[in-house]
Image (cartoon, helix red, strand yellow):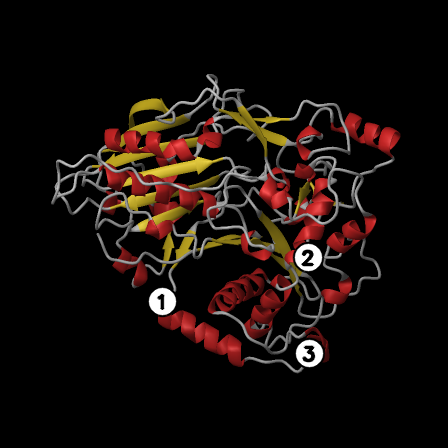
Amino acid sequence: MPSTLDIQVQSTSTIFPSMPLNNPTTTALSILDNTSANFARCAAIWYFPPPTSASPLAPNDLATSLSHTLNSYRPWCGRLSYTSSPFTTHGPQSTRYQRISTTYNTPKDIGIPLTVATSPHPLSLFLPSVRTRKTSLKAWNASESFPSSTLLPTTKLSLSSPSAPEDSPNVVIQLTSFACGSMAIGTAITHCLADALSLSRFANDWALTTRSLTPSKTSPSLPPNLPELSPIFDPQRLDAHAAGDIRGPPDEENQRKARELPQHRYDWYTPVSGQPWPNPKPEDFNDAVKQAAMKYEVGLSPSIPIPWGQWDTTLPVAHRLLHFSKEEILAIYKTASTNTNTNPSLIAKGEHDGKISKHDALLAHLWSLIITSRNLPEGTTSYLDLTFGVRARVEPPLPDGFLGSPIMHVAIPSTSTLLSFSTSTSSSAPSPEDVVEDGSVDGDVSVGVLARRIRSYLSKFGPEEISYILHDRASEIAPQRLWGACLGREHVLLTTWVHSGVYDVVFAEGCRAVWVEAVMPPLDGLVEIMEAPREEKM
């Protein structure tokens, strides 16, 4: 088998909305969008088999439909930038230090680069069939057999690093045709503009537009009828859910309530000896902190340095794709549901019993296996840093079509024995009182306890709690400074794309993706969960 896909780039062009508008618009991103600016790009690759119809997916047709789709995604074609206003802790978010805005509908819009490429190999040479992945390759080592990194452009995205060129795009797309007629469609976007739900919404809208432009078999002479797309780009609609007045000085009580919630507050800007990557602190950050102290008597919010010492980034990391059947998930759920615990601490916190979902059980199952395999010293507290969305957690809820990156993390602890905090210097949530015995049996962490703990911790984030967090983050001197997660031996960073709709993306009738790859860097303890493909197409 070849070691590479032997990708050959045929062309790269920049796609703009099909209906240009000369109406310069600048929109400030939301409070939570700003906090995700340092995250890795949000990216996915859809793998489609050869269409069953006589008409294959043609790059020119996809470019045309993309241009029509961008009429509803104009902010993604513009330019992201940090505010250049003098430092202030008062007034609109758009006027404060290190706040991000997008400017679009101008002659200087960047657009979206579209790369068209080919591979001389059949896709099946690298990607096992759905049936094979469900049976004999249930733990497929994708990092060894599928070099998919060449299916996305290497172009630096906007704000991705201090060295990113001024004209860096917000989105890049690559169409790769294989010798068998299969196609890979890779899309990457800077994370402050889109989370997985936004990326999936865009892909579904693009696919719907593509189908609408495809001549009907029954009425091929009818003109195309473009769909009415309705994504919502209104970042301030999320900010409106913040408690109190976020235009003025912060309310200490709202801040206190926010900081009591179980979230890490790791500081990107505090240098740590031996850290693997350069410190991303802006050059003028120290000056901004001094101004905040002198003019407004405002200091940095509590934080702790990122525990880089727990994370050896030089070790090799494999990328495993695990497939769980319906029967296996039901068995895990049954075990977790019937596994109760009589530990008084757990009973007091409601974690000994109670309803859980199959999703909770699967997360707990994976977390338990990782904890056990790491052989951490007795008394070590490790965390599941779980990413969750807030669209449905505010009141009234935001629709699924709300664009942006309205996500945050909850820090869920686990320890096999009570940990002595007499010498602990950690100021990271959760508090020591939240760390309790897991009821371990023969060294294995109880899946039932962990599943209920996941459910219990997520339940701490309702509309009121989200409003406190938004208020607190709105007053940050630089929202990008704090990170609610980490990786390495004492952390599992888990994100779930379940119910995001990535497998609903259909560019040609009857042709569903045989795999949707959530593109994430291979890092120790990074886990992503999504539904399996629906049908066998290869």
User: Where the N terminus falls, by quadrant?
Assistant: top left
Residue under label 2: 464
Q: Is residue 252 above or below residue 119?
A: below
Label 3: which secondary element: helix
Q: Dot 2, how many residues are within 10 Å of its Cα: few (below 14), some (14-19), or many (20+)?
A: some
Residue under the point 35% across and 28% down: 114
Residue 535 picture location, percent across and down? 26, 58
Front label number (1 vs 2): 2
Residue 167 picture location, percent across and down? 50, 20
Residue 325 is labelled as: 1
Q: Amino acid at mark 3?
A: Ile
Residue under label 3: 347
Q: Amino acid at mark 2?
A: Glu
Label 1: which secondary element: loop
Residue under the point 33% across and 47% down: 505
Residue 21 occupies quadrant: top left
Q: Amino acid at mark 1?
A: Ser
Q: Dot 1, how many residues are within 10 Å of its Cα: few (below 14), some (14-19), or many (20+)?
A: few
482 lies left or right of 445: right
Q: Dot 3, how many residues are within 10 Å of its Cα: few (below 14), some (14-19), or many (20+)?
A: few
Label 2: which secondary element: helix
